[in-house]
Amino acid sequence: MAPHNDIILFHYSFSPYARRVVWYLKLRGIEYAECIQPAALPREDVNALGVKYRRIPIMSIGRDIYCDTRLILEKLEEKFPSGTLGVSQPEQKAFEKLLEQWTINGGVFNRAAQLIPPEMPLFNDPKWVKDREDYTGRSWAKSDISKSRPEALAHMRDFFELLESTILADGRHWILHTEKPTLADIHAIWPFHWLSGLKGALPPSIFGKDHFPRVYSWIDRFLKALKATEESAPKVTRLKGAEAVKFVTQAEFTDPGGIVDNEDPLGLKKGQEVESWPIDSGFSHRDRGQLVALTRQEIVLKTQAKVGHRDIHIHHPRTNFRIRAVDENGGSKL
């Protein structure tokens, strides 16, 4: 492997989703490289790799490109099995996965995003506003954000209260009562950490530290744990866009080709031309290619990089993604 384990993380620093992966890599001490991307489209480096998926982060390991933090974290657990942050005991594993579903699919982050203060300078940038609307499929006009804020605050208060009065109520330091933070902590903490650091997002009269002392203490402990690992963690290699693209396109595949499940309800076949895309956000950007693998956990497509014209494998999770065969006219078969 290359000095950075063949890993390149394409992200921008204030992406709350990207922090999930950065935190994981730091806590594990896994060496990696990063290629910083613009917060709004276009992202020429990602486009050069032949990837249409628009969300951040994405992670490449060799010529395999992984989309969605749910799949990225699973792959890192799988590829670096010594010292994983995930648990193996079935009951704890279920709780770990439920926390991930809660924060991503259960409304926590959607409500958190509605609390971005409309006074932020970004709302004066038409390009950024248009990009957010393309990403979410809803209005990001200041007036609409302001209208949705009271309801979002009410829901977020309930989410804080759930952590304060149930999971953290017994005074535990970490979600699973462990000695150190685990994957369950990463799955649960990221929206709350993000909001607590976003000036003007959470009114102190509702979300002060005296209201939710256990939640804020948990966030503080997590940040201290991260800081402690940074002192011994490998230095992150920073790559420019052209360097990252060249590295990926000249690398080898690191993930086995995989199989297409013959019992999958979709009835798709290996080598078939398909499209795959997320259905919860970023849904107007679809990846297209030959089907390499289809399992209960992931979709793998073979496409071609625009630079170097070598084959690339794009990996999507099954959760909240749709996959369709492409008909002879180039459209998706329903």
Image (cartoon, grey):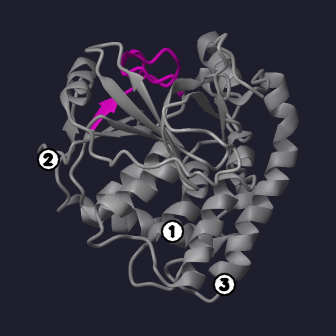
Would residue 87 appear left or right of 305 to someone viewing this image? right
Label 1: element kind: helix
Would residue 143 appear left or right of 52 to someone viewing this image? right
Which image quadrant is residue 160 in?
A: bottom right
Name the residue carrying label 1. Answer: 185
Q: Read off the magenta span.
A: 34-53
Name the residue located 65 percent from the left edge and 57 percent from the top edge: 103
215 vs 144: above or below: below
Does the image show residue 227? no
Residue type, mark 2 in image: Met
Residue type, mark 1 in image: Asp
Name the residue located 38 percent from the left edge and 20 percent from the top edge: 304
Answer whether labels 1 and 2 touch (C-beta < 8 Å). no
Provide residue 101's location: percent of width, then percent of height.
Answer: 66, 59
Label 3: element kind: loop
Name the residue located 28 percent from the left edge and 62 percent from the top edge: 80
Q: Main secondary structure of the magenta part?
A: loop
Residue type, mark 3 in image: Ala
Name the residue carrying label 3. Answer: 169
98 vs 58: above or below: below
Provide residue 319's location: percent of width, then percent of height.
Answer: 64, 50
Q: Residues within 10 Å of mark 3 (few under 14, many from 20)?
A: few
Answer whether labels 2 and 3 touch (C-beta < 8 Å). no
Name the residue carrying label 2. Answer: 1
